[in-house]
Image: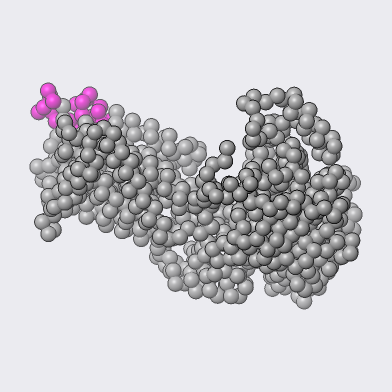
């Protein structure tokens, strides 16, 4: 790392209708450093990076690149100045090859591309930075981790000196994340600058040289990573220190009463391939059962089968003594199954609908909300006003579309609806993913409170820490089967980790 | 090359855009039409003035506009109802024919019944036929996920062929046996003439009143009922609908059946209130179903606005027919309608996105 400043943003202000996303942000990026941009959801990280890459224009403030003031009017301008963005959601053409994707949209390119030459350059770049990927492979054949490498190659190919990565590890397995970090380090060592946007404290500590923390659209400060700690960063981020410990329950689980029983259930995934193989599990009254596993091992299908969104091909599901009809969400709702899905904004909620409509999304059929098939708009509004207050949803009013709310408030709307239905069973899929520290804490408190009231909670999460700290019992899923079932108290992390990776699958299965 | 303008997605869609954008679209369409007229050596202001006089000014002109607006109001509602759920029903045309066939059948069969009974039964028959015909499209979509644009479009041709068969190529129940040289349907008008009311000197066909009632009823259905809520959730996010236990498949079939019922009702009105017979050729020439799509697009899927837009397009069409002649090109009104659809659809983008210019900034980058 040198002291040469590659990018300096000063006094950046960006307003959107009703929100000031950036309110005087300062950021200084040096050449050859990995610089983490840390902040809660809605702290202004994405807006700031969108300004730096030319997607938005700041209302006030200046951007300097290598000491020269610049104004970007498009991402292409920014790229010409050497600033490239690796988006969280990939922008790749699935049927094109890696090489084709890399040159796609390149300015000043000729009509025909020299496949060989591009492939050679791509190979050279991938060797240099440890971005192993075959230039002639087609995107749809690649894993998510490999697709991300293609995104990085795209930016490098165009000669970016400053790379912005927006929550790059959100989609990666721990091993892939480690190799990404090595790549980032290699790029920094060559004098490039890496801006690493994240809200995972552990990652920031292990990968970055310096950290700039944003809160509420303002810069809290920039610190050298070596001179701070996870706890220090957390308190900068939320303005108070947050404890991560195993939760002590006031009202422990009563496992003599089974609220949810899943009996040898099998199901297919979206492509019709078997993805759940005769899964059996039970959740007791007030029990939190954690389902650990690497994403894509059938967790989503499990949640969908139980909540009636997906038909099972065998087996049965019951709540108490009542059978839940296969593939009938209405039946699952009627039996008292609440569901907090992974995809909150487009599955759990209707994004363009108002807060009040979304709060009525599951009980609009009940007599409190509708009579003779007519909606009682006033009852909908009253219900929303009560819930918004009780669940502390920050929204301008109850008619605001939920897509305009921040991630944490979106989740609060969803939880408010699901918890207020007084369910017997709650299926929570990655309920804290993508949320900031404050919101994570609030969501966890709600889950524990629900369990204390006797709700059986099935907590599906990739975050092992979360499961270890909340669950009474841990199930480990691998390739559509439950390979392990252990009490959370004193559970052996190593063993769970290995089972998640399928390494000791055979031994456990025996 | 940098484009001098670009689109930025609006976070919020201001309410005033909902009426301002269609209005601006309309003005732009008229300006483009004026350019076309001017290029062909006509005086645009003069032509527009004559369209206005013939189409809307005065009691007689306005009565004509209402008459022409009636079928368009029904087909417009037909398209709007389906658009609201994100279904593109291009089949209003065919559903209109089939509704007309059904209503004509009943009209011929119950000849001599009291007017009120005749109107009610013909309307019911038109709705039933139209809805069944459209429900086929809905079932195909719900069961096999076929594209409703294509199936509904193809079924328009089927309906046209059926219409020709019944009147020209067979001795069907509908065909008038007394006119073997000039094939036409049996006469219905004499036996079942629907009421036309005079309000302030303006002739208001009863079918237009029915269309207005339908518009208000649909508005209520979509705004205030559980069914309307379900439709809007499906339109917003099919996954969220499935999650909430909304029966998406049956809702698709119901919405298309409703859409077809409206077009079928239009067909019944055409037979009963206006032509007095099943006019196979005339129906296919008119193309009400396709014009209805223009009406619904310009009305931005709002059922009440659809009625007003239908009057506007109706007056325009009427003026086009009556002005046709050497100094008034016959294709002009069609061209204007096409331009209106084009600008209305383009205007839709402006409601979702805002335009930003790069001018001025571009030089700063170059510096």
Q: Residue at x 47, y 37 (%)?
A: B147
Secondary structure mainly formed by the magenta segment:
loop
Q: Residue at x 25, y 27 (%)?
A: B165
User: Would you place residue A17 above or below residue B73 in this image?
Assistant: below
User: Would you place residue B157 above or below residue B228 in this image?
Assistant: above
Residue B166: say if magenta.
yes
User: Which residue is at the front of the view, B114 or B79?
Assistant: B79
Q: Position of residue A426 (x, y in %)?
A: 67, 63
Q: Position of residue A194 (x, y in %)?
A: 78, 50
Q: Position of residue B180 (x, y in %)?
A: 12, 24
Q: Which residues are magenta?
A: B162-182
Q: Is residue B304 visible?
A: yes
Q: Residue at x 57, y 59 (%)?
A: A403
User: Would you place residue A458 above or below residue B326 in this image?
Assistant: below
Q: Residue at x 14, y 30 (%)?
A: B176
**Which corner quadrant of the image does residue A128 belong to?**
top right
**Which corner quadrant of the image does residue B136 belong to?**
top left
In the visual, does B3 lie left or right of B324?
A: right
């Amino acid at each position: 790392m040198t002291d040469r400043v590659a990018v300096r943003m000063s006094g950046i202000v960006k307003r959107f209708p009703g929100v000031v996303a950036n309110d005087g942000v300062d950021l200084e990026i040096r050449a050859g450093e990995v610089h983490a941009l840390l902040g809660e959801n809605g702290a202004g990280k994405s807006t700031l990076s969108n300004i730096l890459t030319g997607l938005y224009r700041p209302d006030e403030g200046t951007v300097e690149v290598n000491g020269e003031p610049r104004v970007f009017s498009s991402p292409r301008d920014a790229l010409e100045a050497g600033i490239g963005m690796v988006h969280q959601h990939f922008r790749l053409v699935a049927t094109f090859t890696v090489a084709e994707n890399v040159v796609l949209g390149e300015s000043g390119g000729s009509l025909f591309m020299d496949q060989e030459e591009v492939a050679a350059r791509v190979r050279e770049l991938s060797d240099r930075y440890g971005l192993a990927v075959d230039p002639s492979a087609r995107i749809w054949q690649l894993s998510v981790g490999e697709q991300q490498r293609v995104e990085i190659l795209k930016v490098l190919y165009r000669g970016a000196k400053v790379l912005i990565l927006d929550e790059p590890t959100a989609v990666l397995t721990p091993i892939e994340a480690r190799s990404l970090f090595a790549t980032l380090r290699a790029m920094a060592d060559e004098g490039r600058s890496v801006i690493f946007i994240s809200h995972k404290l552990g990652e920031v500590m292990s990968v970055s040289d310096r950290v700039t923390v944003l809160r509420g659209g303002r810069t809290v400060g920039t610190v050298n990573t070596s001179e701070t700690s996870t706890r220090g960063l957390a308190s900068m981020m939320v303005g108070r220190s947050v404890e991560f410990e195993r939760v002590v329950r006031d009202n422990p689980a009563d496992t003599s009463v089974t609220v949810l029983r899943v009996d040898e259930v099998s199901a297919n995934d979206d492509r019709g391939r078997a993805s759940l193989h005769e899964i059996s599990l039970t959740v007791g009254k007030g029990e939190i059962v954690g389902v650990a596993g690497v994403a894509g091992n059938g967790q989503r299908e499990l949640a969908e089968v139980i909540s009636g969104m997906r038909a099972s091909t065998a087996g049965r599901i019951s709540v108490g003594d009542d059978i839940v009809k296969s593939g009938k969400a209405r039946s699952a709702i009627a039996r008292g199954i609440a569901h907090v899905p992974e995809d909150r904004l487009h599955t759990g909620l209707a994004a363009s609908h108002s807060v009040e409509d979304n709060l009525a999304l599951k009980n609009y059929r009940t007599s409190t909300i509708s009579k003779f098939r007519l909606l009682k708009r006033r009852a909908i509004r009253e219900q929303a006003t009560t819930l918004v207050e009780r669940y502390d949803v920050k929204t301008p009013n109850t008619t605001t579309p939920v897509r305009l709310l921040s991630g944490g408030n979106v989740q609060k709307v969803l939880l408010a609806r699901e918890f207020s239905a007084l369910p017997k069973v709650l299926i929570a899929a990655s309920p804290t993913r993508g949320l900031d520290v404050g919101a994570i804490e609030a969501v966890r408190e709600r889950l524990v409170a629900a369990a204390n009231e006797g709700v059986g909670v099935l907590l599906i999460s990739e975050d092992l820490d979360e499961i270890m700290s909340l669950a009474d019992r841990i199930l480990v899923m691998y390739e559509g089967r439950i390979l392990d079932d252990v009490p959370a108290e004193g559970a052996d992390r190593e063993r769970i980790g290995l089972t998640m990776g399928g390494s000791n699958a055979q031994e456990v299965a025996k | 090359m940098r484009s001098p303008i670009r689109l930025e997605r609006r976070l919020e869609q201001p309410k005033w855009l909902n009426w301002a954008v269609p209005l601006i679209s309309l003005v732009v369409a008229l300006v483009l039409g004026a350019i076309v007229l001017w290029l062909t050596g006509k005086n645009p202001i003069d032509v527009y003035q004559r369209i206005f006089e013939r189409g809307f000014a005065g009691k007689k002109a306005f009565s004509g506009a209402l008459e022409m607006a009636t079928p368009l109001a029904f087909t417009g509602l037909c398209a709007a109802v389906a658009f609201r759920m994100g279904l593109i029903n291009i089949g209003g045309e065919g559903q209109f024919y089939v509704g007309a066939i059904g209503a004509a059948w009943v009209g011929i069969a119950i000849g001599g019944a009291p007017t009120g009974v005749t109107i009610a039964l013909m309307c019911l028959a038109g709705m039933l036929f139209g809805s069944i015909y459209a429900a086929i499209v809905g079932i195909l979509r719900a069961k096999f996920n076929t594209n409703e644009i294509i199936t509904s479009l193809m079924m328009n041709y089927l309906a046209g062929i059926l219409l020709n068969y019944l009147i020209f190529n067979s001795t069907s129940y509908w065909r008038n046996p007394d006119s073997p040289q000039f094939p036409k349907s049996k006469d219905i008008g004499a036996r079942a003439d629907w009421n036309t009311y005079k309000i302030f000197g303006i002739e208001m066909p009863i079918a237009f009143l029915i269309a207005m009632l339908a518009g208000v009823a649909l508005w209520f259905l979509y705004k205030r009922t559980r069914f309307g809520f379900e439709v809007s959730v499906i339109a917003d996010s099919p996954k969220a609908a499935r999650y909430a236990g909304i029966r998406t498949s049956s809702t698709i079939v119901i919405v298309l059946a409703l859409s077809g019922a409206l077009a079928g009702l239009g067909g019944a009105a055409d037979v009963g209130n206006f032509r007095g017979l099943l006019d196979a050729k005339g129906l296919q020439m008119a193309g009400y179903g396709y014009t209805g799509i223009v009406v619904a697009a310009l009305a931005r899927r709002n059922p009440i606005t659809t009625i007003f837009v239908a009057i506007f397009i109706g007056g325009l069409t009427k003026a086009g027919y009556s002005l046709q002649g050497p100094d008034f090109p016959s294709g002009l009104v069609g061209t204007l309608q096409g331009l209106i659809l084009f600008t209305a659809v383009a205007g839709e983008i402006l409601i979702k996105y805002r335009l930003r210019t790069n001018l001025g900034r571009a030089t700063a980058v170059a510096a």
